[in-house]
Image (tube, rainbow, N blue to C red):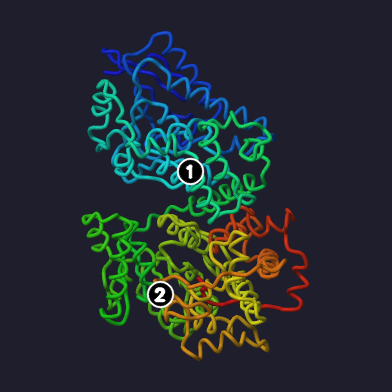
Amino acid sequence: MKQPENKWQHWTLRREADGLAWLEIDKANSTTNSLSAAVMEELGCVLDTLDARPPAALVIASAKAAGFIAGADIDEFSRMDSAADARVMVARGWTLFERLADVSYPTLALIRGHCLGGGLELALACRYRIVVDEPGTKLALPEVMLGIVPGWGGMKRLPDRIGPALALDLMLTGKAVDAKKAKRIGLADDCVPPRVMENAARMRVRSGSANPPLPWMARLMNGPLQAKVADKARKQVAGRARREHYPAPYAIIDMWARFEGNALAVPAGDPAALETIFASPTTRNLLRVYHLQERLKGFGKGADFVPRHVHVIGAGVMGGDIAAVCAQRGLTVTLQDQTVERIAPAIARAAKLFERRFKGDRRLVRFALDRLIPDPQGHGAVRADVIIEAIFENLDAKRALFADLERRARPDAILASNTSSLKLEDIATCLSDPGRLLGIHFFNPVAMMPLVEVVAGEQSDVLALQRAAAFVRKLDKLPLPVKSAPGFLVNAVLGPYMLEALRCVEEGIAPEVVDAALVDFGMPMGPVELVDTVGLDIAVAAGKALAGAGAAPPQKLLALVSAGKLGKKTGEGYYRWKDDKPVRATAGAVPAGLADRILAPLLSATRRCVADGVVADADLADAGVIFGTGFAPWSGGPMNYLQRGANAPLGVDSVLAERNPPLIQQDPI
C-alpha cells in the first residue's frame, strides 16, 4: 500500500514499505499535465526531498487519465518577450533533467497516454521507460513543429537511446511513435497492457538490469561518422525546407553534431543559437499556427452531441472516403448508392485505408469493415444521427433527395450536403424546415486533409451547426465555420491561385519553374502539379475552367482536355506521370517576383473572404487556408503574411484589377 509522504500542488510522492517511491504528476486546475514553471519548480523540491532520503527506486507516473505529460507550457513560451527569457526556460529544464538523470537510485517513467516534448525529455532522463499498450499512447519530440528545439536533453539522450538515424528522423519531423513501435526501436524497455502496468514497473525498476548497448553501426554514427550523418541530414532537410523559413531543424542537427545536444552551449552569434531561433519570425508564426489549430479544435465543444451512426449517400470517391473515415473513427456507417456494385469500390478503398491506419492489425481492420455497411436501399437513414449527401452536382437531384430525407430521418438528425458548387439556400427550398440543412464540406483526399468546412446557409440552425462541428471533431478533424458563398473559403482562394499559375504556363513559363517558385515559398505542392493531381477535366468543369463569364479559359488547359490528357489519372497532363509521380524536366531559373505574382490572387481572395464575412475574422481565414491548402505555415497564414509585410507581394490589387480571376466552385483538392 502506498502512503503519501508529501503532496505538493502538482506532485504527490508516496513510498512503499520496501523503499520503492511513486511520484505522480497531476497538474492542478488542468485536464492535462504540462511542465509549467510552477510544475518544474515543485519537481526541484521533490528531488530535494528525495536527496535527503533517497528511495530504493523511483517510478514517475501520471495521475490523470488524459495522459502522461503533454510537454512544456506553450502559453508561457508564447508570452516570452526576449531571447534571454527563452534561455532561462531552457536552462531550467536542462538543469533539472540533468539532475534527475544523475540520481543514485534507479528511476522509471511509466508512460500511459501522450508523452510529448518535455514529457518525453523527462522520461529519457529516467533509467527505464515502460509504455502502456493503448491507442492513446504516443511518444514524440514535436518541438520542431513549433519552430523550437527539444532543449531539455532530448537532443542529447534520444540519439544515445535509439541511435542518431532514428532520433534525427523523429526530431526533424516531430512525428510520434505508438507504444509497440517505442518498444521495437528501443525507446521503451517494455510495452505492457494496462492491467499489469504497475507490477511491470515495479519489476523493471527493481531489476538492476543494464540498458542494452546501441548496435555497432549506431555507435559509429554517434561517434566517428557523426559529421557525415549530420551532413546527410542537412541535405535531406534542405530538400524539404529552406533555412530562412525553418531554422529549427537545421539548429537541431547542429546542436547534436557540434554541441552534444546542449542548446545552452551554442554561442549567441551562431546560426543555431537559441537567440537566432527566438528572433526568427517563423517561431512566432508557428506558435500562432498552434493556437489557431487549438481554436479550431474548440468549435463544437459546447454541443451535447455524441454521434454514433452516420448515413452517407453517394459512394463515389468523396462519399465513399467520408464513410471510410467515419468507420475508422469508430462510428457505424451505412453507405448508400444505387447498387451494391457501385458501393463495392468504396469498400475496397476503405479496406486499404484500414490496413494502413491499423498497421495490418487484422482484428481492428475487420471491426472497421464490419462498421461500414453497404445500404443500397437507404434503410440506415431512418436511424442515423448524421446524414451526409455526396451525390453528383445536380440541384434537382439534391432537392428530391433531401425532401425524401426530411420525411424519413429522425427529427434531430443532422442533414448535411458535401456540395461546394451549389448554394445551400437553393437546395433548402425543398424542405419544410430549411434550417435543418447545412454543409459539411470535406476535402480530397478525405483521410489526409485535416480541415472540414462547416457551412451555414442563410437559415441553418445554430444548434445544428454546433452539433456538426462536434461531429467533425469526433473524426479528429478541424471544423472551420464558414458562410454559404461560392467556393466557401478554401476553394475560393485556391481557384484564383491555380488560374494565375496556368496563365504563367500559357505565357511560356515551364510548369517546373512555376511549381519550383511556390515550393520554394513553402507550399507543399506546386500549383500546376496540383491541377494535374485534381484532374484537368475537373478544373475545366469548375467555374468554366476557372474563369468567369466573358473570360477565356487557358487554351493549353482546353487543348489537353480535348486530347484526353487529364493529368495524373490518365498518365499525362501538364506533366507526364509515372508511378503516381510527375516526370519533371530540370527547372530553370525562377524569374524574380514569380511567386509573388501567383500568390497575389490567393492573398487578395483571402482578404475578400474576410471582408465578405465568409469567415468570422482574419485568424480563422489563416487557419482555414493553412489547414485546407497547406499554405506555408512559416508565414503564419495569408492574412498574417499580408499584415506583417515581410517579403509580402506588392501590387496585389493591381494584379487583380488586370486579371479579375473568378472564384472556383468545385473541390480543387
Name which residue type carries label 1: Lys
Residue highlighted by disc 1: 228
Whether 377 is drawn above or below 117: the answer is below
Q: Does 55 sit left or right of 534 as displayed?
A: left
Whether residue 120 is visible: no
How far apart marks 1 and 2 lie (CA) works out to 66 Å
Residue highlighted by disc 2: 406
- Sequence-wise, which precedes: disc 1 or disc 2? 1
Q: Write the residue at 25% across / 59% down.
A: 365
Query: Where is residue 367 shown, x and y percent of the image?
Result: 24, 58
Q: Write the residue at 60% across / 34% down.
A: 76
Query: Where is residue 248 shown, x and y percent of the image?
Result: 57, 44
Whether 469 is drawn above or below 398: the answer is above
Query: Where is residue 477 shown, x and y percent of the image?
Result: 45, 57
Q: Write the residue at 50% across / 40% down.
A: 227
Name which residue type carries label 2: Glu
